[in-house]
Amino acid sequence: MSGQTTNEQEFARARGAMPGGVNSPVRAFGSVQETPRFFVSASGPYVTDVEGREYVDLVGSWGPAILGHAHPAVVKAVQDAAAHGLGFGASTPGETELAELIAARVRRPNAIAGPVERVRLVSTGTEATMTAIRLARGATGRDLIVKFAGHYHGHSDGLLAEAGSGVATLAMPGSAGVPAPIAAQTLVIAYNDLDAVREVFAARGGDIAAIIVEAAPANMGIVPPSRGFNAAIADIAHAHGALLILDEVLTGFRVGPAGWYGIDPVPFRPDLITFGKVVGGGLPLAALGGPAALMELLAPLGPVYQAGTLSGNPLAVAAGRATLDHLDDAAYARIDAAAATIADAAASALSEAGVTHVVQRSGSLFSIQFAATPPVDYDTVKAQEAFRYPPFFRSMLQQGVSLPPSVFEAWFVSASHDDDAVARILEALPAAARAAAEA
Ligand code: PMP
């Protein structure tokens, strides 16, 4: 095709214009030793690169594309909104509707009320967790934050210590540029370890503003919470006058209509919940929510400042509303079924090839761990044979399946992964498993 470039050419050019050729580190494909693909379009479960190659996509824009790419109803909602103006820097009725929708959805089955009475819309998951932490500090008058190793909550200064996602992929302990006094405000402990939680609260409980947790961790691969873990840490935090910030940026509205909060086998009470990805339907929008008494400590009502030029942007709000509107029980059933089929087929292919592995699952989220036993925390995640993932990934890519370019990331299935798309993934798995075996 004339005028067409290659992924190689695009990457070379991009590296001259942007650090590493990317605007978010994992996109550089460094850990899988492959040329990143430069995409030009996407539809349903498929993405197409600059060379005109189509791939079945299991990245899903890292979560937002839960209905499939360019879902007609979402695209139309955004087009309609755009025709009325790209943003006003003032309030719109749509923002209230989205906030009401979030509050109404985040309920336990049959509950008449949920933990979200007020919502603030922001533009990224990073802003949502950063604001939740400021709010927790403002509410408690305390400074310390407890986080778990391997959990990722965005890239704000205080949350990069032993973080998951790209920080884990690049094997970085944290980030340069974070002042030591700020890093010292974050206490990092092992996940799924209630003794560690009890100990840190016994030692510093009076100074801890909040404990922040991924509702079901998915940024060090999938590591499900042990049964009752979220409830236990909520109790410990509350007993010490601290808050529980439940980070559902990734799991929210993905693992079920009410996120992980709605399906955790043991009910619990988070104080603040953060959302992102799905709630923005593919455009930059995220949110935090909680009880009115807490949320109304935010400016303009309270002393905790937070703001945003693009917060509640009408296009992003339209995309989010359209996405939530189409996420009905049937959509979740399709996602769950496709995820189960792909996860089971990956396990079979790896077993057949003699590769030691476990497939880790939290609802429809799953990932492969190249180890004999399921990991429970970041240390056990890191102990796996991670070197088997790059050849597995490259084989899948060569066969037309786009996986997350890191063993530490979840595989994102959408409601548009129909039988054809799933069949293409299943066909590619045996050769990829053999490549992993030979690594
Ligand atoms: N929290 C979690 C659990 C996430 O998975 C992410 C992003 N992967 C974030 C926060 C940060 O969101 P964003 O990239 O939109 O800033």
Image: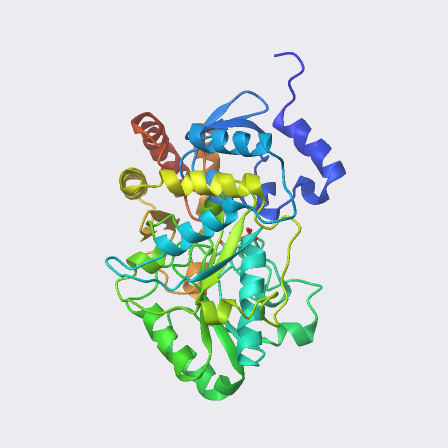
Locate the C terminus and report the quarter of the image it occupies: top left
* Position of 78 relative to 200 (above/below): above
- Residue at far right of view: 16
Left/right of residue 335 with respect to residue 61 in the rendered view: left
Rendering coords of residue 375 (x, y %): 37, 61
Q: Quadrant of residue 421?
A: top left
Q: For residue 148, say whether it is visible.
A: no
Residue 349 or residue 316, whichever sits in front: 316
Left/right of residue 148 with respect to residue 195 in the rendered view: right
Residue 69 or residue 386, whichever sits in front: 69
Rendering coords of residue 5 (x, y %): 65, 21
Colour scheme in use = rainbow
* Position of 256 relative to 129 (above/below): above
* Position of 435 relative to 154 (above/below): above
Total number of numbered discs in the rendering: 0
Q: Residue at x 32, y 29 (%)?
A: 418
Q: Quadrant of residue 8?
A: top right
- Residue at far left of view: 110
Rendering coords of residue 293 (x, y %): 47, 72
Q: Residue at x 28, y 61 (%)?
A: 112
Rendering coords of residue 349 (x, y %): 30, 38
Residue 308 or residue 100, whichever sits in front: 100
Left/right of residue 5 with respect to residue 218 in the rendered view: right
Locate the N terminus and report the quarter of the image it occupies: top right
Q: For residue 365, say whether it is visible.
A: yes
